């Protein structure tokens, strides 16, 4: 039995619609399309590379041209001179000293019998600090008083005798020569009495120095004596290592502060100027003080004026010998103009400033510096209140140079 050929039937029925195509003809069209796209892609890549390299160069060239055009004229900022302040604070270091201090020495020789004040003791004027035992001096005083009594008796007898002889001379009972002799003897006895009285007064004064007293109100800062120590009248001490002074007293109720004011500011500190003090141990605290006196002469070595400032210290806050900062308020009747320090130019011919003149060109003016305020300085001469002064000028700036003002502010 024979099987029917179905494929031949299908080919016969569709022979009018299907056209046979060879493999070579089928691959021709995609190849042509790829050959056309390759040059286009290469051209696009080349264009992109050119754009990446050329466009920045064009922008850079444009920016450089603009920068060169801008640098042809210097751009500056200007400030206008303003009136300087009337008052200026001058800060100087000061040394705090007691208003009065004294070294107490023995005025008479002897042994310390007792002492009454140690260091830190506040004493009053005339208060006894120590007693000195002087038996030899006491004996000398007794002898001097006995001599005074003898001289007084001798003078009384000689004086009465001279008066009797003067009476008898009137009746010619005695001669003139004998009367003169009696009168002369009376005068001699009176002189001897006066000498004896002076010696008694001297020794009595020396005996009074047996009590060592305070010369003024103050505080005892040094005590160099003890009971039984030998002291001499202003001479060598009696204990090893003693400097000779018995006590040292300082008056701390009122203190002196000495400062050295520079010559430039010396004329601006009259007596009575109000100042205040600051110290490290009292941060933020101010102590009101007053200029009490000045030396009225410049020290030729330091070129400064010695100024004394007095401060009330009854509360004992400040201590003598401490370091303090003195704030002086300097006042001037005719303040000049001021400029920032950044506007100054230091040239060989002096300090100058650059001013924007007519047609926006630079003019250099020589100025004179007055007071120094730190970031600002007073310009005594050389500028006017209407000048446009260049701030932060370059060192190479020159007169006649054209500039462009960026901003005008104070």
Image: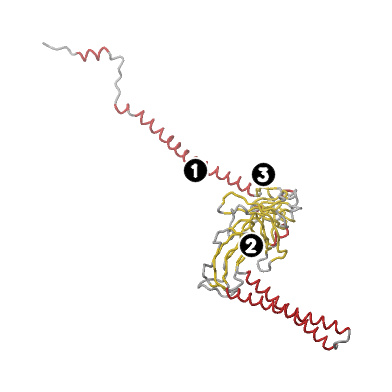
Residue position marked by numbered label 2 in the rendering: 126
- CA gap between label 2 and label 1 equals 103 Å
Point out the frontmost of discs 3 and 2: 2
Residue position marked by numbered label 1 in the rendering: 53
Q: Count residues near mark 1 (Cα–Cα under 10 Å), then give few for <14, some for 14-19, many for 20+.
A: few
How many numbered discs sit on the rendered protein? 3
Q: Residue at x 77, y 84 (%)?
A: 185
Quadrant of the drawing holding the N terminus: top left
Q: Where is residue 86 shown, x and y percent of the image?
A: 72, 50
| SS category of the residue bearing label 1 | helix
Q: Where is residue 151 shown, x and y percent of the image?
A: 71, 79
Q: Is residue 367 visible?
A: no
Query: Within the image, what quadrant is residue 31 found in?
Result: top left
Task: Please state if 3 lies on the left or on the right of 390 as rendered.
Answer: left
| SS category of the residue bearing label 2 | loop
Which circle's residue, 3 or 2, is located before the other in the chain? 2
Point out the frontmost of discs 2 and 1: 2
Q: Where is residue 130 shown, x and y percent of the image?
A: 57, 65
Which circle's residue, 2 or 1, is located before the other in the chain? 1
Q: Residue at x 66, y 77 (%)?
A: 146
| SS category of the residue bearing label 3 | strand
């Amino acid at each position: 039995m024979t099987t029917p050929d179905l494929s031949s039937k299908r080919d016969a029925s569709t022979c009018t619609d299907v056209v046979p195509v060879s493999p070579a003809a089928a691959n021709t069209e995609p190849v042509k399309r790829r050959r056309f796209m390759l040059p286009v892609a290469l051209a696009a890549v080349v264009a992109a590379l050119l754009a990446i390299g050329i466009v920045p160069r064009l922008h850079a060239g444009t920016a450089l041209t603009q920068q060169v055009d801008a640098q042809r004229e210097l751009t500056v900022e200007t400030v206008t001179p303003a009136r300087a302040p009337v008052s200026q604070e001058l800060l100087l270091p000061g040394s705090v000293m007691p208003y009065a201090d004294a070294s107490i020495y023995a005025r008479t020789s002897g042994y310390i019998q007792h002492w009454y004040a140690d260091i830190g003791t506040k004493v009053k004027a005339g208060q006894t600090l120590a007693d000195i035992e002087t038996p030899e001096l006491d004996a000398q005083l007794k002898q001097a008083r006995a001599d005074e009594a003898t001289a007084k008796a001798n003078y009384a007898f000689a004086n009465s005798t001279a008066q009797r002889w003067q009476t008898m001379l009137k009746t010619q009972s005695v001669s003139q020569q004998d009367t003169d002799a009696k009168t002369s003897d009376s005068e001699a006895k009176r002189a001897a009495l006066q000498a004896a009285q002076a010696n008694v007064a001297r020794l009595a004064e020396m005996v009074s120095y047996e009590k060592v007293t305070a010369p003024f109100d103050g505080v005892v800062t040094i005590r160099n004596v003890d009971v039984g120590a030998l002291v001499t009248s202003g001479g060598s001490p009696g204990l090893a290592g003693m400097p000779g002074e018995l006590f040292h007293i300082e008056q701390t109720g009122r203190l002196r502060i000495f400062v050295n004011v520079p010559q430039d500011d010396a004329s601006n500190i009259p007596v009575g100027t109000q100042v205040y003090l600051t110290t490290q141990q009292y941060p933020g605290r101010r102590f009101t003080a007053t200029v009490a006196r000045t030396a009225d002469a410049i020290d030729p070595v330091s070129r400064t004026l010695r100024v004394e400032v007095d401060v009330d210290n009854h509360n004992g806050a400040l201590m003598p010998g401490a370091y303090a900062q003195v704030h002086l308020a300097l006042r001037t009747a005719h303040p000049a103009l001021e400029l920032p320090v950044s506007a100054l130019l230091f040239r060989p011919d002096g300090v100058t400033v650059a001013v924007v003149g007519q047609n926006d060109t630079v003019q250099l003016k020589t100025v004179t510096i007055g007071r120094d305020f730190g970031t600002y300085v007073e310009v005594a001469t050389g500028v006017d209140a209407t000048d446009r002064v260049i701030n932060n000028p370059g060192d190479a700036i020159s007169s006649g140079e054209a500039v462009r003002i960026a901003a005008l502010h104070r």
